[in-house]
Image: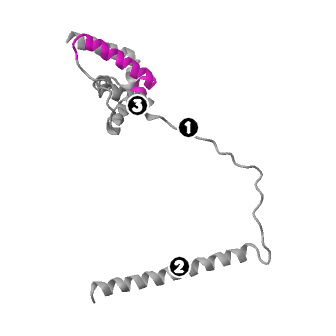
Amino acid sequence: MTIHQRIERILKIIGIVGALLIVLFIGLIILSNIVASPGTHTTAPEPTSIPTVVPTATVDVSQSPAYQLALDDNHYATPSSAMVAAYQKVLDSLQAKTGDDQTTIADETVKGLTELQGKGIDDTCLQLMQAVDTIYTKNDHTSYHDALTSLIAVLENA
């Protein structure tokens, strides 16, 4: 038997199985109508209230702290989505550890980086946040500002 003949045979079997499934489905529909309402036809009840559609807000990613930090570190060239995701990951972790919101973390990072660059230390926002994230745990119960200030003090004296 050639491959062409095998394919034709498989297609015939699929066609027969499909036809049987359709007949079975129609039979079930007819049977359910007979059982549900022997001799009477029912209509769907009228709705008591009209459902309202609540519009969802769209998020402008370019306004997120992660995007803004990536843009800054990338010298204002449009960052890739993978780059933004790396910033978002560390922001999420820092927010969970410190309880500070991501905008505050981003603002503090930029201020800290500016201070370090004034002292001749050339890092990126991502490197600075990753350093704080690595050093501090949620159990330290410290704000991002305090954690960053401590790290900057160590870096300046190194």
Task: Look at the image and tell me in which quarter the C terminus lies.
Answer: top left
Gap between marks 3 and 1 measured at Cα: 21 Å
- Mark found first going from the N terminus, 3 or 2: 2
Q: Mark 1 or 2, which is nearer the eye?
A: 1
* Tag 3 residue: 92
Which mark, residue 57? 1
Instruction: Tell which residue pokes out farthest to the right in this image.
Output: 40
Residue 65, given in percent of the width and then of the height, sits at 41, 27
Q: Which residues are magenta?
A: 94-121
* Quarter occupied by residue 40: bottom right
SS state under label 2: helix
Q: Residue at x 35, y 25 (%)?
A: 137
Give the mark nearer the N terminus: 3 vs 1.
1
**Does residue 73 appear to the left or right of 100 in the view shown?**
left
Is disc 2 surrounded by few (<14), some (14 to 19) or many (20+) residues within 10 Å? few
Quadrant occupied by the N terminus: bottom left
Q: Earlier in the sequence, mark 1 or mark 2?
A: 2
Between residue 85 and residue 73, name the one nearer to us: 73
Residue identifier under label 2 = 21
Say whether residue 20 is magenta: no
User: In 3D space, how far apart are the residues under numbered discs 3 and 2 (Cα atoms)?
Assistant: 50 Å
Q: How far is disc 1 from disc 2 in space, using C-alphas?
A: 43 Å
**Residue situated in front as seen by the camera: 39 or 79:** 79
Secondary structure of residue under mark 1: loop
Report x, y in % for residue 90. Answer: 35, 30
Q: Is residue 147 visible?
A: no
